[in-house]
Amino acid sequence: MTITVLVPDDDGMRALAEVAGVRPVRYDAGKPLPPEAAEAEVLIPGPGAAQRAESLLAGLPRLRLIQLLTAGAETWVNVLPDGVLLATCRGAHSGATAEWAVAALLSMYRELDAFAQARGERAWAPRSTDSLQGKRVLVVGAGDVGRALRRRLEPFDARVTMIGLSAREGVHGVDELPGLLPDADVVVLLVPLTSRTRGMVDAAFLAAMPDGSILVNAARGQVVDTEALLTELKTGRLRAALDVTDPEPLPEDHPLWTVPGALITPHVAGSVSGARRRSYAVAVAEIERYVQGGLPDNLVHGEY
């Protein structure tokens, strides 16, 4: 038995070419699906495919699995047809995302932007800065990315506390945040976007963070109430490192661009060399499990 898999790019075709029991078929976004789509059981969506989901899925009568190349699944959850499984690419981008969070914190604590400005002015301007050493870091999201971040923070002698949506050994529950936030120097957001996490970082959450602390968002922009964050940043009481924003892309006239104390990157935490290869390595392993009659390890249940 051979299962047809629709693949959005040549990288995917190469990755799946040697997988037993799989026939990869290339399709192009925005163009009619190939005739083989009528037999396809697995779809690997390309960029922007969720926005065209209705027309795309209409041409896939035998679809049984959507295998994402991203860790986030929120754009597909509400358009998933009955009887179709959804699997993420959890694990492919964890190291890069964790690396971004560490880089952002080091840049802010060691004031690299100020030294870059001084260099532009050809000014030799030595100064003492803060340090990541000894900082108390709350990692909100104790999954694969959260664990990868903890492994990278601890060698800096940062004190890491893990927060999950539910408590378990070594992990505090999200309901404990009100008691943990006042002692945090850093709060890193790594949660999926669901009805439970949308807007969880509101005015009360931010008010509970101590003066001078840093909010790091590598999750989704909608996890944070942007207006509440702007209010805190304008006073200078908090700082923020944001790889994601709400709205996104950030309009050129948005106040987040110019508010003090914000470091912003354009959703690139996982955009590193080798990312595509790692994504397809996870996707291939998941598809192999499906072909062999099993369920993907990264199967989405409910919202996530």
Image: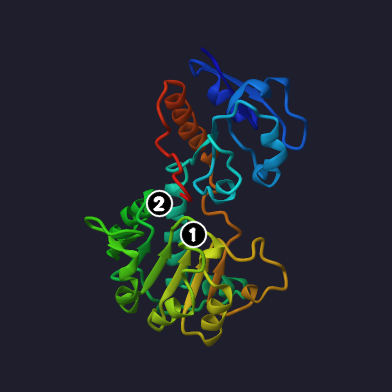
- Quadrant in the rendering for residue 23: top right
Q: Which of the two labelled residues, at mark 1 and mark 2, occupies the earlier sequence position?
A: 2
Residue reaching furthest to the right: 31
Horizontal and vertical percent position of residue 168: 25, 56
Label 1: how many Cα within 10 Å (few below 14, some 14–19, many 20+): many
**Viewer-proximal residue among 55 and 278:** 55
Q: Which residue is mark 1?
A: 218
Residue depicted at 72% across the width and 32% down the height: 28
Tell me what residue is drawn at x 42 percent, y 22 percent.
Answer: 293
Instruction: Tell me: 47 left or right of 161.
Output: right
Point 47% across, 63% down: residue: 197
> Label 1 is placed on what type of residue?
Ala
- What kind of element bears circle 2? helix
Marks 1 and 2 in Cβ contact (< 8 Å):
yes
Q: Pick the residue in front: 272 or 289.
A: 289
Tell me the kind of residue under disc 2.
Val
Q: Position of residue 114 (x, y in %)?
A: 53, 75
Camera-side residue: 154 or 295? 295
Residue at horizontal 23 percent and vertical 57 percent from the top: 170
Using the image, determine if residue 100 lies above or below residue 211.
above
**What residue did someone put label 2 on?**
145
Tell me the CA gap for discs 1 and 2: 10 Å
